[in-house]
Image (cartoon, rainbow, N blue to C red):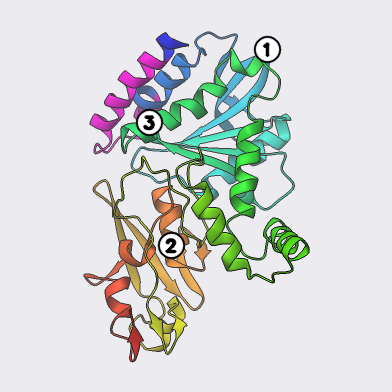
Amino acid sequence: MPDAEILFTEHVKLVREHVGLSLSEADTRAYLVDPVLRILGYETVGDLRREVSVPATKESLDYALLVDGKPHVIVEAKPVQQGVADQHAAQCVQYAAVLGVRWCLVTNGRQWALYDAYAKVALAEKRIIEVRLDTDDAAAQRAWKVLQRFSKQQQTTPNPLTDLLVERVVVDELGRSDSGAVDALRQAVKKRFGEAVKSTVVLSTLKRLLEGNTSMASVPPGADTPPIRSKAAPPGPSAVTPAPKKGGKRVVLSDLIQASLLPNGAVLDLRVHGVTHVGHIKEKGIEVDGILYLSPSAAAAAVTGRASNGWRDWSHKGETLDQLRTRLPTVQS
């Protein structure tokens, strides 16, 4: 679809021009969402319906993308200045279950998040991938590779999204030390060479081997491990750095709370593209839009839509969490 890709590239420029505007949901749909759907081939009453009523409810969904007259994808739109988070997908996933549709796309025009309504897991784990149009050209290219799978043409092919599902599981399994995949690798090393290794050694080895040789977008929101980055991706402010240690132990958010550097209920702020997002300190983490995240990086990723260093991104009264934790007694860098 070379012509479609050219049109998408032009649309990305428009998104970047409009990202700072305070557009209503209706304007966001008209100027930022509808053009993408047209590029993907949904233009007529036979393949696109808006404000579709959901049986047994008084609600309606924003878009239904049809293939052979049947809905294949549901799209839920939000205003451009509103971030895309899991709670925004709850309604979309619920509608999909009623209508028997598997795929949900939630977007504010600059972010597009994909959910699998059929996955028998918690809502956050139904989230397969998120792509952005408003950051850099590499991210926009990644967005096109994902969104073109929802074109009318691609949706008529068998299983156009299988590799995305596999990618999400692989990233999840290779991003946590308690996963069965990591344990299986530990056991394989022990069986072959008689060497007992820790999960952290396996994880660091995997990261080293995969770095620069993976198409993975990022560790999904909520993951605490450093993202697997391509060598082509320039280091940015969201790069994860090792946490300071207190008495040989890694500093965590609760250390700041217990030291009264962050009182319970304290308000944090994080700015993304000129928009300030707010989080609230709770006893066990940071609450953003009613969802509790157990680490600063997980909370930041939920706002930014990418793996982020929450210690540097979140601020309290002008100081980043990174600066606050250096004020803990006996903290070692």
Label 3 and label 1: CA atoms lie apart by: 30 Å
Quarter of the rendering occupied by the C terminus: bottom left
Which picture quadrant has residue 174? bottom right
Q: Is residue 171 magenta?
A: no
In the picture, measured across the screen, residue 175 lies left or right of residue 68, that is: left
Closest to the observer, 306 or 275: 306
Which badge, 2 or 1, comes first in the chain's sequence?
Answer: 1
Q: Amino acid at mark 2?
A: Ser
Which x, y percent locates residue 267?
A: 34, 70
Taking the view exactly as shown, the residue that stands out farthest to the right is 191
Q: Residue furthest front?
A: 193
Which type of secondary structure does the marked residue at label 3 adopt? helix
Camera-nearest label, 3 or 1: 3
Task: Name the residue nearer the viewer: 329 or 122.
Answer: 329
Question: Quarter of the image holding residue 22?
Answer: top left
Q: Which residue is mark 1?
A: 69
- The answer, for residue 126, to whether it is visible in the render is no
**Residue 70 percent across, percent down from the top left:** 69, 17
Residue located at (29% from left, 80% from top): 326
Magenta highlight: main SS: helix
- Kindly identify which residue carries mark 3: 140
Residue drawn at 52 percent across, 58 percent down: 222
Label 2 CA crowd tier, 10 Å (few <14, some 14–19, many 20+): many
Answer with mark 3 or mark 1, whichever residue precedes in sequence.
Answer: 1
Label placed on residue 297: 2
